[in-house]
Image (cartoon, rainbow, N blue to C red):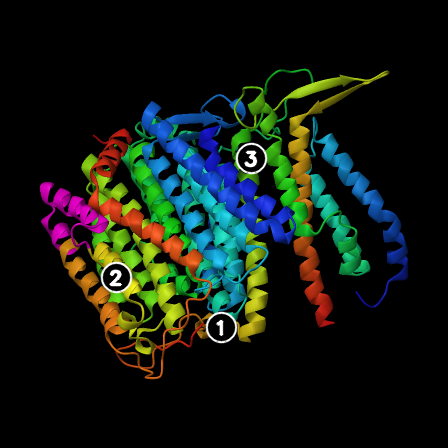
């Protein structure tokens, strides 16, 4: 039953939020999020203690029943999702610092999004994975369209069209895989695809990977991400960037390790170059932009490139690096977006050309930004350093010198755009000389949420041993590649 | 039979793709819905079109006799509902966008991403 | 919708409950024969939509048991809850249970599957019905 809580708890909370009187909505929502966090912690400790947990819905015999399974990878991602939901809801309590407008559907949609993501992380059935992708997509669309202004709806349209193409490709791949093997369960598929001739297996795997790469916003399919993310309110944006692309990456890892093993080398080779191009195009896009949210959105693409690069190394150590990078990126990128929301609160704008003087006006915020930015760039001893270190070291060990060089070079460009934010938002005086930092009105929940996140990221960077041991074990439990 | 289905599938998906590439908002969304329905047909035919008997267990019997494969039918039902939801959503989205933007040309829709006026810097957006 | 169609209006006031009863019959019939929550729910939607077309959307909305979003949420919640009795019986989630309640002359077969189907029925009625009514309402506004 514990395996199903990442789906059931947020889904039930979303439904209850719709049913209770409006005054009770926030309480129900917070209680549900807290319960989810407890369940995710229990799930992680069970998985670490007793190994993977599985349950088959309805008690149907395999391979017909829909199986749910949680291993270390799933448990870690569910925990991150639960954590981010709590951070975002806490931020939303104050209703300040670019919080989402209070609509009756906001809380149900946030919980629905997490339910879709959580279920995608624990399902062990390919068609079921498709269903959870769609639930996530529907909730994401609802959240994007929430304001109802032209700007929001335009962003929604772009998000919708490109993501629907992704899910349609996924559905086509699922149908063709079923036609070829007659299986949908991951384990049964793993056994069945090993018997397929390469002339059938390779096109199927390519189609499946293509769908997941669109979802993961990899080069050249990333257009939906920078076209839509900046129209979101900050807490929702933080949840999006922590979860949505990660589902695509998670599905890619699963499909390359469980569904198809061993996947052909050609695919990993192509994936590596896609990763390098994602890193470069994301970093260059970020260097071009001046809007804080757009800079951070483009950085997400570049960071996704690093994760894909680690996956393309096709080794247990590469997988471990990818998982560590996913966890690091979810936390740090969300924290940076929330920091940007506090900058917005202080200056009233997200564009670097309109803001400044925050080093004098908000010294603590400067310190937090500096810590997070250094972590994103990968300066030791931060969480980003350990993640990038593992990726680059493993590329060098496996003799992929060009990939390693690209990873290091992109790090320098990342440093440039972080420096740009630092110089423009914090160091330079505010363009309007009469500007004064406004009072910190109703900001306590926002400060608490960001503070908690920063403490977590710092401890991640200073005490990485247990976490690295965890992701190594998680990568070893992915079957078929060693 | 399977060849006729394959031909129908290819036609629907090709027509849908053609429409989806259009710059007209409604054509684009209807094209996507068509592709979705084509792929639903693919899901339906993925269990092979062997028997035309519906998969119902006859009264008194304990298991399915000669009948169609029920799994793709269950899958396609789910997929149809999902594509129906997306069609509903996209139509409402299109109606609202047409009302707000006053144009069905997707190339004119730049509200979320204004075109740059400066040669080296992006457009400065007003505070949201 | 204008212009008024008197005959249709009078007829629909009688037909509306009949249609809803028919949708319930299809819901229950789905136990062993073609039918079920989804189809039944769609018939209920048809009843609501016919109401909105001949009278007004406000009238049709009034005749829903709950506002559409809450009706949908209640339906999905019932469907989720129908999976819980199996868990308490020590089976995996969504394992369905059947009981037969003996009555004086006949017996009443009950199952958690029926509860699930009822949830689907309400969810479809709420979601698709609410969608139809709000679209029709925008047409009404324009007239």
Question: Which residue is located at x 70 percent, y 34 percent?
Answer: C35
Using the image, name the chain to which the residue with label 1 belongs: B
Q: Which residue is mark 1?
A: B105
Task: Give coordinates of residue B82: x percent, y percent.
Answer: 54, 46
Task: Give coordinates of residue B57: x percent, y percent.
Answer: 63, 22
Q: Which residue is mark 3?
A: B73
Whether callout 1 and callout 2 share a subunit is answered no
Question: Which residue is located at x 68 percent, y 30 percent?
Answer: C114
Q: Which residues are magenta?
A: A378-406
Using the image, name the chain to which the residue with label 3 belongs: B
Task: Give the distance between the C-alpha atoms of the residues marked 2 and 3, in whole angstroms.
Answer: 57 Å
Q: Is residue C102 above or below residue B28?
A: above
Task: Give coordinates of residue A157: x percent, y percent.
Answer: 48, 63
Task: Give the distance between the C-alpha atoms of the residues marked 3 and 1, in whole angstroms.
Answer: 38 Å
Q: Main secondary structure of the magenta part?
A: helix
Task: Give coordinates of residue C102: x percent, y percent.
Answer: 79, 16
Using the image, name the chain to which the residue with label 2 belongs: A
Q: Is residue B98 left or right of residue B107?
A: right
Q: Which mark is residue A367?
A: 2
Residue A455 falls inside the magenta stretch: no
**Residue A2 visible somewhere in the drawing:** yes
Whether callout 3 and callout 1 share a subunit is answered yes
Residue A396 falls inside the magenta stretch: yes
């Amino acid at each position: 039953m514990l395996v199903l809580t990442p789906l059931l708890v947020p889904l039930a909370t979303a439904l209850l939020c719709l049913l209770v009187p409006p005054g009770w909505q926030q309480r129900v929502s917070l209680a549900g999020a807290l319960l989810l966090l407890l369940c995710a912690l229990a799930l992680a400790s069970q998985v670490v203690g007793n190994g993977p947990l599985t349950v088959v819905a309805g008690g149907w015999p395999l391979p017909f029943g829909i199986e749910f399974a949680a291993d270390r990878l799933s448990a870690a991602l569910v925990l991150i999702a639960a954590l981010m939901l709590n951070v975002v809801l806490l931020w939303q309590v104050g209703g300040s610092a670019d919080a989402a407008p209070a609509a009756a559907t906001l809380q149900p949609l946030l919980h629905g999004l997490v339910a879709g993501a959580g279920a995608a992380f624990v399902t062990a059935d390919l068609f079921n994975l498709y269903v959870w992708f769609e639930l996530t997509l529907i909730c994401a669309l609802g959240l994007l369209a929430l304001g109802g202004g032209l700007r929001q709806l335009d962003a929604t349209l772009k998000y919708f069209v490109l993501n629907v193409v992704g899910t349609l490709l996924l559905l086509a791949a699922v149908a063709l895989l079923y036609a070829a093997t007659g299986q949908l369960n991951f384990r049964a598929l793993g056994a069945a695809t090993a018997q397929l001739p390469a002339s059938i297996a390779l096109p199927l795997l390519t189609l499946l990977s293509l769908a997941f790469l669109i979802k993961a916003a990899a080069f050249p399919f990333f257009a939906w991400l920078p076209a839509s993310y900046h129209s979101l309110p900050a807490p929702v944006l933080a949840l999006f960037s922590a979860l949505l692309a990660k589902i695509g990456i998670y599905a890619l890892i699963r499909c390359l390790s469980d569904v198809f093993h061993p996947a052909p080398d050609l695919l990993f080779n192509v994936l590596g170059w896609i990763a390098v191009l994602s890193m470069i195009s994301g970093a260059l896009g970020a260097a071009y932009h001046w809007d804080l949210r757009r800079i951070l959105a483009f950085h997400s693409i570049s960071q996704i490139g690093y994760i894909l690069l680690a996956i393309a190394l096709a080794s247990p150590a590469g997988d471990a690096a990818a998982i560590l990078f996913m966890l690091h990126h979810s936390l740090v990128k969300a924290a940076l977006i929330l920091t940007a929301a506090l900058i917005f609160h202080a200056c009233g704008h997200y564009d670097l050309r309109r803001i400044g003087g925050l080093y004098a006006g908000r010294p603590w915020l400067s310190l937090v930004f500096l810590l997070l930015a250094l972590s994103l760039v990968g300066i030791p001893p931060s969480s980003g350093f350990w993640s990038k270190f593992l990726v680059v070291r493993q590329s060098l060990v496996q003799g992929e010198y060009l990939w390693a060089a690209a990873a290091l070079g992109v790090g320098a460009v990342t440093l440039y755009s972080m420096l740009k934010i630092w110089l423009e938002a914090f160091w330079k005086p505010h363009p309007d000389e009469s500007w004064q930092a406004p009072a910190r009105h109703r900001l306590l929940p926002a400060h608490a949420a960001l503070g908690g996140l920063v403490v977590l990221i710092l401890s991640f960077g200073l005490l990485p041993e247990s976490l690295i041991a965890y992701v190594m074990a998680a990568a070893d439990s992915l079957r078929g590649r060693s | 039979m399977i060849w006729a289905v394959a031909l129908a599938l290819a036609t629907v998906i090709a027509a849908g793709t053609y429409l989806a590439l259009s710059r007209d908002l409604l054509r684009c969304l209807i094209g996507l819905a068509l592709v979705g329905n084509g792929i639903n047909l693919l899901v339906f035919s993925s269990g092979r079109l062997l028997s035309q008997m519906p998969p119902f267990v006859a009264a008194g019997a304990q298991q399915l006799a000669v009948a169609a494969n029920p799994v793709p039918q269950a899958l396609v039902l789910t997929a149809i509902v999902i594509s129906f939801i997306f069609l509903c959503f996209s139509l409402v989205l299109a109606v609202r966008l047409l009302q707000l933007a006053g144009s069905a040309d997707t190339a004119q829709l730049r509200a979320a991403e204004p075109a740059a006026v400066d040669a080296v810097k992006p457009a400065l957006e007003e505070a949201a | 919708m204008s212009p008024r169609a008197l005959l249709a209006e009078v007829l629909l006031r009688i037909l509306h409950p009949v249609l809803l009863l028919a949708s319930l019959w299809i819901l229950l019939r789905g136990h062993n024969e073609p039918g079920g929550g989804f189809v039944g729910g769609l018939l209920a939607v048809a009843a609501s939509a016919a109401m909105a077309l001949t009278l007004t959307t406000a009238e049709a909305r009034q005749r829903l048991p709950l506002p559409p979003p809450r009706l949908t949420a209640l339906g999905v919640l019932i469907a989720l809850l129908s999976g819980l009795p199996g868990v308490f019986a020590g089976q995996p989630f969504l394992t369905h249970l059947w009981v037969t309640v003996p009555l004086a002359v006949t017996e009443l077969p009950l199952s958690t599957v029926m509860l699930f189907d009822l949830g689907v029925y309400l969810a479809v009625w709420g979601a698709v019905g609410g969608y139809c009514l709000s679209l029709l309402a925008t047409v009404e506004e324009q007239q």
